[in-house]
Amino acid sequence: MSQARIVHQQLKEKRSYKVNRKRKQINSITPEETALVIAYYGAKNFNDSDGWSSVYNQLSNGTLKLMLSSKYNKELAKPGTGVQYVFVKKQSDTSKLTIRNAPSYTLENDQTVNFYQPYNYENTIQRVGLEEIIDFGNEHEIAGQIKQREKNVTLTDVRKTETNNTLTENDLNDDPNYLFEKALVFYGTQRGTSDEWKSLKKMIAEETVKLEFSGSASEGTQIVLQQAGSTGALIFYESASTGHPALYNFGHLTGTDEDDYKFGDTGNSNVGYTVKELLPYINSHGGRAAVEKMPIDQYLP
């Protein structure tokens, strides 16, 4: 038997690896072997800038693990079967920032592999069949490596925990769908007692308003939710400084006056809510599902 066919033979003996030559369909291989072969192909075929050059070695020695996620799959150009396979550091969390900052791939039903580089979900680097990838590994005679290194591969399936309705600070980081701004608006509509907040809450409930931001809370600016003229609900962001973290104040704007910060407190410095203080209330009043309903369609920088 030639070395070039060893990977096929090994996989066949271990997990009934089958190739139907007429249908061009691979029925099954072990997840660890799949991850290693795909990582090897990516490391050998893509540039350093694509984020793949060291994936194979780091996955092999246990520095990286393969995370199975479906949380942001809908944002991918080619979502495959609904699972995103992400190469992340062993102790990584499941935040948007972590997942977007890592090389990943998806698999189609016909076993086409869609390769992605960090921070680019709009385009695949390449689309290639899994059978072709395995043949590539055989051509480079890595069967022995695959067999030896398979035991070092860690797979972590986080899909069940991702369905949790509880919002965390990690969820709010680097989310392209304005989740952070939506969370702030949701809190304001639930707690605000001024006419401006009551009116805004009513319009959101009746689906008669869509919000556009001209400033982001992450930029240390005011967020004024204006209905007309110069009045409207107000969220004011006070950046972190020595002695206190970032604070968010909620009030309303009447003419040019800003008042009712923190729903009754004055607009003095060091007054407001931290994200950690906001989240328990949000999670006890509907959580992620309620926040995502906030009608924020566009962000205007």
Image (tube, rainbow, N blue to C red):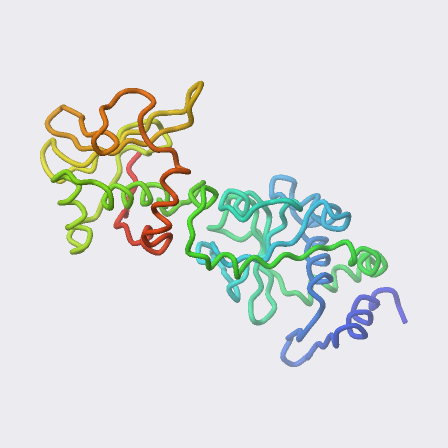
Q: Quadrant of the C terminus?
A: top left
Q: Residue at x 38, y 45 (%)?
A: 280
The image quarter in which residue 299 lies: top left
* Spot occupied by residue 160 in the image (x, y as percentages of width and height): 52, 61
Relative horizontal placement of residue 173, taking residue 27 as reference (left or right): left
Q: Residue at x 72, y 58 (%)?
A: 37
Q: Pick the residue in front: 220 or 188.
A: 188
Relative horizontal placement of residue 126, taking residue 40 as reference (left or right): left
The image quarter in which residue 144 lies: bottom right
The image quarter in which residue 246 lies: top left
Farthest right residue in view: 1
Q: Quadrant of the N terminus?
A: bottom right
Q: From this view, report whether residue 251 is shown above or below residue 174.
A: above
* Spot occupied by residue 88 in the image (x, y as percentages of width and height): 62, 47
Q: Pick the residue in front: 100 or 152.
A: 152
Q: How many marks overall?
A: 0
Q: Pick the residue in front: 178 or 272.
A: 272
Relative horizontal placement of residue 259, taking residue 53 as reference (left or right): left
Q: Residue at x 15, y 44 (%)?
A: 198
* Spot occupied by residue 71 in the image (x, y as percentages of width and height): 48, 56
Question: Is residue 223 at least partly visible in the picture?
Answer: no
Q: From this view, report whether residue 76 is shown above or below residue 238.
A: below
